[in-house]
Image (cartoon, helix red, strand yellow):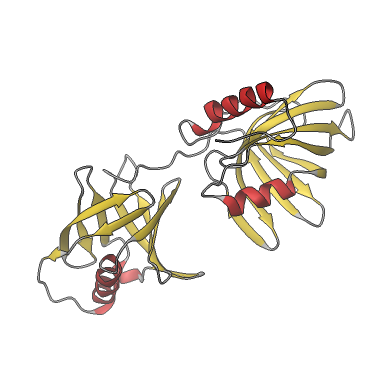
């Protein structure tokens, strides 16, 4: 049960409920509003940079800033799963080129995107320079720490795991990733049915199998395939995918329209969801 620190129990419950209703019910942030002067308005977080790394924001990460005085504003939002509040003070009441963010309270749930949440919380505090890149884009810079990129456009919703055609775009091993070789690009596709079935192409031969989804993991049963002889990049890709899908439970994660499957040994794949036009 999430709790808010440093607040009376009744107010904590109201804030926790509001954060969950606004940001977590459908896995996305606010629909987006026309931002006001300077830093005010509703913003979805696109990505942040910290420690030399760029982290893509989960769909729920957002920030809402409401002016409460000439040089003050109240902020609330979501780090990606946990809700938070903060106070904002504008350094320059007219140009508003810098702000000071004072964190308030936050919920404390253990969430999937903790690396991003921790980095976001560390960045969104203290003095921050505000740079408006366009009418719907804003960049907050914490000198010496990193940047937060915001947009007033609504985030791209996560594609559903099942009843989506996924095209394999890359192979991963630990922290390294490589694109599918060009001759095999676009040839490995699969979909997971709501009935627990899986089917598609491994890059050359078609396959079908049972697929059990248990929370954050998928386990593929024995693959039944066609029997064409496959050589070159298509054959290499097929052998890699056959080994991966048959290796046991795979952790799955979806961010926007990208699916990642990862085995216990760190090997895995990335796949892109087909758009409605495809």
* 179 is higher (above) or lower (below) than 134: below
The total number of labels drawn is 0
Of residue 195 and residue 175, the one placed in the foreground of this image is: 195
Residue at the spot 51% in from the left edge and 69% down from the top edge: 175
The part of the image, by quadrant, that contains residue 218 is bottom left
Tell whether 14 sits left or right of 155.
right
Q: Measured from the top left, where is residue 39 in percent x and y?
A: 75, 32
Q: Measured from the top left, where is residue 222 in percent x and y?
A: 17, 64
Of residue 15 and residue 135, the one placed in the foreground of this image is: 15
The answer to whether residue 262 is seen in the rendering is yes
Residue at the spot 79% in from the left edge and 31% down from the top edge: 87
Tell whether 192 sits left or right of 55.
left
* 58 is higher (above) or lower (below) than 53: above
Residue at the spot 20% in from the left edge and 57% down from the top edge: 200
The answer to whether residue 31 is seen in the rendering is no
Q: Quadrant of the N terminus?
A: top right
Q: Measured from the top left, where is residue 121 in percent x and y?
A: 70, 46
Q: Quadrant of the C terminus?
A: top left
Q: Measured from the top left, where is residue 66 in percent x and y?
A: 73, 24
Residue at the spot 63% in from the left edge and 37% down from the top edge: 107
* 240 is higher (above) or lower (below) than 198: below
């Amino acid at each position: 049960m999430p709790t808010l620190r440093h607040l009376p129990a009744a107010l904590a419950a109201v804030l926790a409920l509001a954060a969950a209703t606004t940001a977590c019910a459908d896995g996305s942030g606010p629909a987006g509003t026309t931002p006001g002067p300077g830093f005010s308005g509703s913003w979805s977080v696109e990505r942040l940079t910290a420690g030399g790394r760029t982290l893509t924001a989960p769909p729920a990460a957002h920030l809402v800033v409401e002016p409460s005085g000439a040089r003050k504003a109240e902020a609330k939002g979501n780090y990606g799963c946990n809700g938070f509040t903060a106070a904002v003070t504008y350094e320059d009441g007219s140009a508003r080129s810098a702000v000071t963010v004072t964190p308030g309270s936050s919920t404390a749930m253990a969430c999937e995107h903790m690396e991003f949440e921790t980095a976001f919380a560390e960045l969104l505090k203290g003095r921050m320079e505000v740079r408006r890149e366009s009418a719907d884009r804003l960049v907050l810079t914490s000198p010496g720490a990193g940047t937060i990129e915001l947009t007033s456009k609504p985030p791209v919703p996560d594609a559903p795991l099942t009843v989506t055609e996924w095209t394999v775009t890359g192979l991963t091993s630990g922290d390294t990733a490589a694109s599918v070789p060009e001759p095999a690009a676009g040839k490995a596709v699969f979909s997971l049915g709501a009935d627990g079935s899986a089917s598609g192409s491994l890059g050359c031969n078609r396959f079908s199998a049972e697929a059990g989804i248990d929370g954050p993991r998928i386990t593929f049963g024995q693959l039944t395939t066609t029997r064409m002889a496959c050589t070159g990049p298509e054959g290499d890709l097929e052998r890699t995918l056959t080994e991966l899908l048959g290796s046991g439970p795979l952790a799955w994660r979806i961010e926007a329209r990208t699916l990642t499957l990862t085995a216990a040994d760190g090997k895995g794949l990335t796949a892109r969801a087909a758009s409605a036009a495809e």
